[in-house]
Image (cartoon, helix red, strand yellow):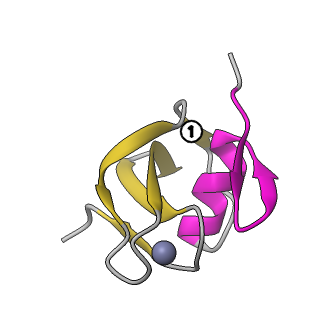
Amino acid sequence: MSENRVVQGRMVTAETLAELIEGEPVMEAESISEADRDCPDCGGDVLSVGYMPSVTAFVVGQKCQDCSWSDTDRD
Ligand SMILES: [Zn+2]
């Protein structure tokens, strides 16, 4: 089940959203969900996606739909 969202004027899937957050292609991504927060930079809506940047890692990333702000739950 793939659900497309619009981020910074561009349609993204879970995989491409994860790639935007990570800065490089990821191995696997879960479906996109709404993060329970507003963007700290612009106050826009924030999306959340869980993904595997490598076989041994799982990261939950967040990305603003309106600006370039993003964050991950990495330490
Ligand atoms: Zn923003």
Q: Residue at x 68, y 15 (%)?
A: 1
Instruction: Please provide the residue range marked out in magenta.
Output: 3-22
Q: Residue at x 55, y 68 (%)?
A: 22
Q: Position of residue 7 (x, y in %)?
A: 68, 59
On screen, 52 above or below 43?
above
Q: Position of residue 67 (x, y in %)?
A: 58, 77
Number of marks drawn: 1
On screen, 25 above or below 23?
above
Q: Position of residue 28 (x, y in %)?
A: 59, 39
Q: Nearer the viewer, residue 48 or 23?
A: 48
Question: In the rendered structure, does residue 67 fall within the stretch colored magenta?
Answer: no
Please indicate whether residue 40 sits to the left or right of residue 66 in the image.
left
Residue reaching furthest to the left: 75
Q: Residue at x 71, y 68 (%)?
A: 8
On screen, 75 above or below 73?
below
Residue reaching furthest to the top: 1
What amino acid type should be assigned to the residue bearing mark 1?
Answer: Ala
Q: Position of residue 13 (x, y in %)?
A: 72, 41
Q: Residue at x 44, y 57 (%)?
A: 46
Q: What residue did someone put label 1 on?
A: 29
Q: Nearer the viewer, residue 37 or 16?
A: 37
Sort mark 1 into few (<14), some (14-19) or many (20+) by Cα contacts within 10 Å: many
Residue reaching furthest to the front: 43
Q: Is residue 54 visible?
A: no
Please indicate whether residue 53 sits to the left or right of residue 60 in the image.
right
Q: Is residue 69 visible?
A: yes
* Disc 1 secondary structure class: strand
On screen, 11 above or below 42?
above
